[in-house]
């Protein structure tokens, strides 16, 4: 008897450059969590950006194909998305997974699209230049064309239904998880605040710096921020506020170093004004790091009762919340313990299983 042919899944990794933060972390952990049992009856290949193909992807459970597209520029990425379906058909794929917000407007092969946030719809003022309009057009076309849309939170699922008019039955919430890794041999030396993210305005690092400046110098903690490039726009703001002795802008760091910083930090401060999920909250919790984050519904969805919340739009309120937690080690210990338990409620294996199930179902029609 001839065994059934495996379901061929092409994963669209054109977006992956190594510097796109949370979405890349989600994809690495998701595909790295596929177990041998899950891989029975399926066959994976990835259509990769030139950057990823050169760097390699040992976490991916299949062949990595160099698309020849350099995706460090968003235009190359956006244009490349439109030919993913055609490339998938030529490769004999049964379904395509586009895991980073954008997918082809037309595809001869079924597409499952993962949407992480709708910032270009909800807060277009946070997206530079004309990019918001381009993102809206691409996201709308890709989501409507896709056979199934996965998303990371109930808040973003609601946005998809309200902003794009997607029927609820087309949208499936598949939350990510924390890294599950704890750096070993790490001891906390002194007081250190940690924050991370890209430099788009909604991340609100200028608000965090303003809050730090409002803390008296004798009590002011050190702050380390990762995620900026070599020409970090926060450098001028640090100088303007006279915070050079307290703030380190560390640029992009590999995940192992980020894990170490979670373990070293006294407190993760996550002052964002908008998120589709808020992965750093969960990553910090899984590392036993107490979390102070913005009082947003989606971050309550992630952190529950295991995080401290503040109106980060108010620098004084943020400064007061930081000082209050630094002065209360018992509360920080409570948050660390509660956060570890909260993070354990999320599982990359479950994320991988739900994603794979959606892909196979889409392939079968």
Image (cartoon, grey):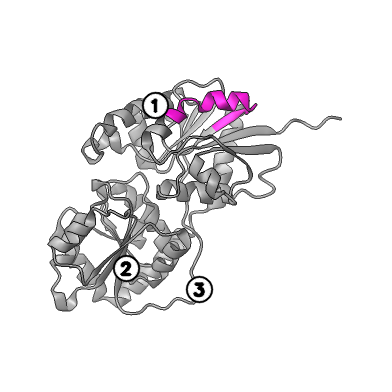
Residue 95 part of the magenta segment: yes
Name which quarter of the figure residue 265 lies in. bottom left
- In this rendering, would 102 be left or right of 85? left
Residue 8 visible within the image:
yes
Residue highlighted by disc 1: 166
Residue highlighted by disc 3: 184
Residue 348 image offset from top left, x and y in percent: 53, 52
Neighbours of disc 2 within 10 Å: few (<14), some (14-19), many (20+): many
Q: Describe the element under mark 1 as helix, strand or loop.
A: loop
Identify the mark at residue 340; answer none if there is no mark.
none
Q: Earlier in the sequence, mark 3 or mark 1?
A: 1
**Marks 1/2: CA–CA distance:** 39 Å
- In this rendering, would 111 be left or right of 36? left
Neighbours of disc 1 within 10 Å: few (<14), some (14-19), many (20+): some
**Residue pictured at 45% horizontal, 23% vertical:** 145
Residue 250 image offset from top left, x and y in percent: 33, 62
Residue highlighted by disc 2: 267
Q: Answer yes or no: do the residues labelled 1 and 2 have beta carbons within 8 Å?
A: no
Neighbours of disc 3 within 10 Å: few (<14), some (14-19), many (20+): few
Name which quarter of the figure residue 309 lies in. bottom left
When the figure is inspected, residue 123 is found, relative to residue 133, above or below; the finding is: below
**Marks 3/2: CA–CA distance:** 18 Å
Residue 220 part of the magenta segment: no
**Residue pictured at 48% horizontal, 43% vertical:** 174
Q: Which residues are magenta?
A: 79-96
């Amino acid at each position: 008897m001839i065994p059934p042919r495996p379901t061929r899944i092409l994963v669209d990794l054109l977006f992956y450059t190594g510097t796109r933060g949370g979405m890349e972390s989600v994809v690495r952990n998701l595909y790295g969590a596929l177990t041998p049992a899950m891989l029975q009856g399926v066959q994976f290949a990835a259509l990769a950006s030139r950057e990823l193909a050169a760097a390699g992807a040992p976490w991916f459970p299949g062949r990595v194909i160099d698309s020849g597209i350099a995706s460090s520029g968003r235009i190359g990425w956006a244009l490349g998305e439109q030919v993913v379906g055609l490339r998938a058909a030529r490769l004999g794929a049964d379904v395509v997974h586009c895991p980073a917000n954008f997918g082809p407007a037309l595809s001869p092969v079924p597409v499952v699209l993962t949407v992480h946030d709708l910032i270009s719809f909800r807060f277009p003022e946070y997206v530079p230049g004309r990019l918001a309009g381009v993102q809206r057009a691409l996201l709308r076309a890709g989501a409507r064309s896709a056979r199934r849309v996965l998303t990371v939170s109930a808040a973003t699922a609601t946005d998809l239904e309200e902003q794009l008019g997607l029927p609820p039955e087309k949208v499936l919430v598949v939350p990510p998880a924390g890294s599950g890794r704890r750096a070993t041999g790490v001891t906390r030396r002194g007081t250190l605040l940690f924050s991370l993210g890209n430099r788009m305005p909604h991340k609100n690092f200028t608000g965090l710096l303003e809050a730090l400046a409002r803390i008296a110098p004798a009590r002011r903690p050190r702050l380390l921020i990762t995620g900026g490039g070599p020409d970090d726009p926060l450098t001028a703001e640090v100088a303007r506020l006279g915070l050079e002795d307290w703030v380190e802008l560390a640029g992009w760091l590999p995940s192992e170093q980020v894990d170490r910083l979670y373990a070293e930090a006294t407190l993760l401060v996550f002052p964002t004004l908008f998120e589709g999920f808020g992965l750093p909250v969960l990553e910090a919790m899984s590392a036993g790091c107490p979390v102070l984050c913005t009082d947003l519904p989606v971050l309550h969805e992630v952190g529950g009762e295991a995080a401290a919340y503040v109106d980060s739009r108010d620098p004084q309120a943020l400064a007061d919340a930081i000082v209050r937690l630094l002065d209360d080690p018992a509360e920080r210990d409570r948050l660390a313990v509660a956060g570890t338990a909260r993070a354990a409620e999320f599982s990359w294996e479950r994320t991988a299983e739900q994603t794979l199930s959606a892909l196979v179902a889409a392939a079968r029609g």
